[in-house]
Image (cartoon, grey):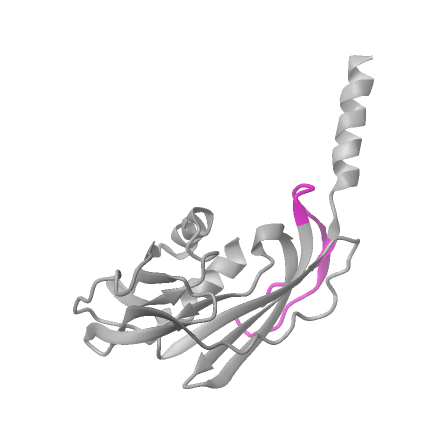
Amino acid sequence: MLLLLIFGIVLLQKASTLKCHKCLPDGLGSCKDAAVECPSEGFQCAALRVFVFKGGSKVSDINMTMCALAEQCVESSLNFGITRTVITSKCCTSELCNSQPAPDPQKSTPNGIKCFHCDGQTCSGTLNCEGNEDYCMTTTVALGGEKMTMKGCASPLICSSSQTAHLSGAIGAELSCCQGNYCNSAISTRAGLLLLVAPLMAWVMFS
């Protein structure tokens, strides 16, 4: 009787999880689509797009599909001033429903929050945060044996404790967030262009 009960619970848990498309881009920007079972019933099927804007012009648009938690199904952004990376999503709760791409990002305007950002050797420039970028942030990544730092604005989801843990585990990034104008103190640093996209891409790939 106990064995039947355990077997029934296992089958019930399996039946409650969704099957979704999963397609994460490789280094060449392409991916091979596969149908996967989500880890638990708390996940939804998600289509995500990662946009990179430089100087107001779109320079990259990457599509991907995966299983995602409901709280990840929001528009998020990481703004370094020189570039702004935006993730849009479209989530659904039926089998293999995430075949259509996520929408374009909403038009954003300054929200009144100001943070420091890095320009060349210094990080004392003012950056006007946009949309739902409610946090100032600082990220430091080790590349080629050197630590490089970038500062800017970030959305709440990117600054959540679980997502900063993903960043740290994925690429060794150190990410700190704070609330309040100019709370990410201005210090001199070496800023690397590779950091403009890498942290947010790592967050997407490993979350």
Residue at the image point whose x is 33% and y is 62% from the top: 136
Q: Is residue 36 above or below residue 130?
A: above
| Residue at image coords 79%, 17% | 3
Q: Is residue 49 visible?
A: yes
Q: Which sits in the foreground, 165 or 88?
A: 88
Q: Based on the picture, tell me whether residue 189 belongs to the magenta stretch.
A: no
Q: Quadrant of residue 196?
A: bottom left
Q: Position of residue 1 (x, y in %)?
A: 83, 12
Question: Is 36 positioned to the left or the right of 173 in the image?
Answer: right
Up/down of 36 relative to 112, above or below:
above
Vertical position of residue 7 compared to residue 205: above or below: above
Inspect the magenta stretch and tell me whether residue 21 lies in it. yes
Q: Is residue 29 left or right of residue 180?
A: right
Q: Position of residue 206 (x, y in %)?
A: 51, 54
Which residue is depicted at the point 62% across and 64% down? 89
Q: Position of residue 20 (x, y in %)?
A: 73, 55
Query: Residue at horizontal 68%, vertical 71%?
Result: 101
Q: Main secondary structure of the magenta part?
A: loop
- List the single residue furthest toward the left: 188
Q: Quadrant of residue 173?
A: bottom left
In magenta, the rendered stretch is: 20-43
